[in-house]
Amino acid sequence: MNRVYQIVLKEWAEVFKNRFVLFTVAFLPILAAALPLGILYAINSSPDFVTDIGEDIPAGFAALCNNLTGEECAQYFLISQFILLFMLLPLAIPITIASYSIIGEKTTRTLEPLLATPITTAELLGGKAAAAVIPGVTATWMAYLALVIGAALMDVGPGVMDRLLDPFWLTAVFVVGPLLALTGVSVAVIVSSRATDPRTAEQTSMLVFLPIMAVFFAQLAGLILIDARLVLLIALGLIAVDAVLLAVAVQLFQRENILTRWK
């Protein structure tokens, strides 16, 4: 366990020297919290805005507004559009870190001495995965906390506050978020283990965003409704996907090839 801890500290010391990584970790959480809070402020400042939004609420979503006033339903509808942002956030940050982690060390020739130590592949990848997942998940949780506190300070309806703290949001942020972070890291490790350029590795790893973006646009188009049932199904599916990806990542990471043949 101490080896994994040392790998985590080493990774953070290296990757956070990169300004792009720092920008991603700092800016995306701020954006995730600021956008819905800005919309809440606009709603509170303009009663007409509430009326206009209320006319555009899909019938399927309106069914979720039980015991909510018209204003609360409009507020909750707009906030709910950003729940995928809180699911994308723990995916984007770990991918950025993990993609740089292995391929960056390969290009600077600092990975070979590490691989020559007694550390196991599982310990090495576990440390690198933890170093990528922890900042992404922590940033997401802090952004969610900022959203809840900001909504409370804006004195939104009690029904909206209850919905922000119900199992639907809690599952999406505290269960699906970490599972997506693990998915992104596993994909990034697999790609980075084979790539020879950090930018190529990161761009290829970003393909993992496509399924989430498909869900996002399907929601905007009114084709699907993201509710507690869908979030639970996503969580169960991610558990199986993560198990497979982790096994593949460990299998494909051939330290002997890196030590003897990587150029």
Image (cartoon, rainbow, N blue to C red):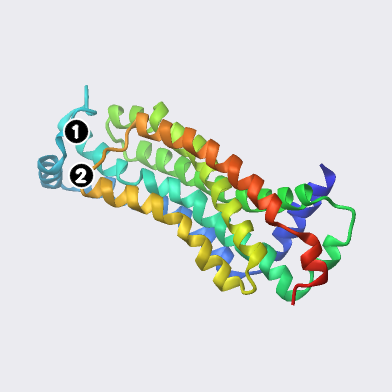
Q: Name the residue: 43% across, 46% down.
A: 86
Q: Residues within 10 Å of mark 2 (few under 14, many from 20)?
A: some
Question: Is residue 151 toward the left or the right of residue 17 in the image?
Answer: left
**Amino acid residing under circle 1:** Gly
Q: Which residue lies most toward the top here?
A: 67
Up/down of 89 relative to 263, above or below: above
Question: Is residue 145 toward the left or the right of residue 128 in the image?
Answer: left
- Where disc 2 sits, the SS reads loop
| Residue linked to disc 2 | 222
Count of numbered circles in the view: 2
| Residue linked to disc 1 | 60
Question: Is residue 207 toward the left or the right of residue 18 in the image?
Answer: left
Q: CA distance from mark 2 to mark 1?
A: 9 Å
Q: Which residue lies most toward the bottom here?
A: 263
Task: Pinpoint residue 89: horizontal percent, then vertical percent.
Answer: 47, 51
**Amino acid residing under circle 2:** Gly
Image quarter (top left, top right, bottom left or bottom right) of the N terminus: top right
Q: Earlier in the sequence, mark 2 or mark 1?
A: 1
Quarter of the image for residue 128 reads bottom right
Task: Pinpoint residue 165: horizontal percent, then vertical percent.
Answer: 40, 30
Q: Name the residue: 72% across, 59% down.
A: 11
- Where disc 1 sits, the SS reads helix
Question: Is residue 257 toward the left or the right of residue 236 in the image?
Answer: right
Whether the residues at callouts 2 and 1 have beta carbons within 8 Å, the answer is yes
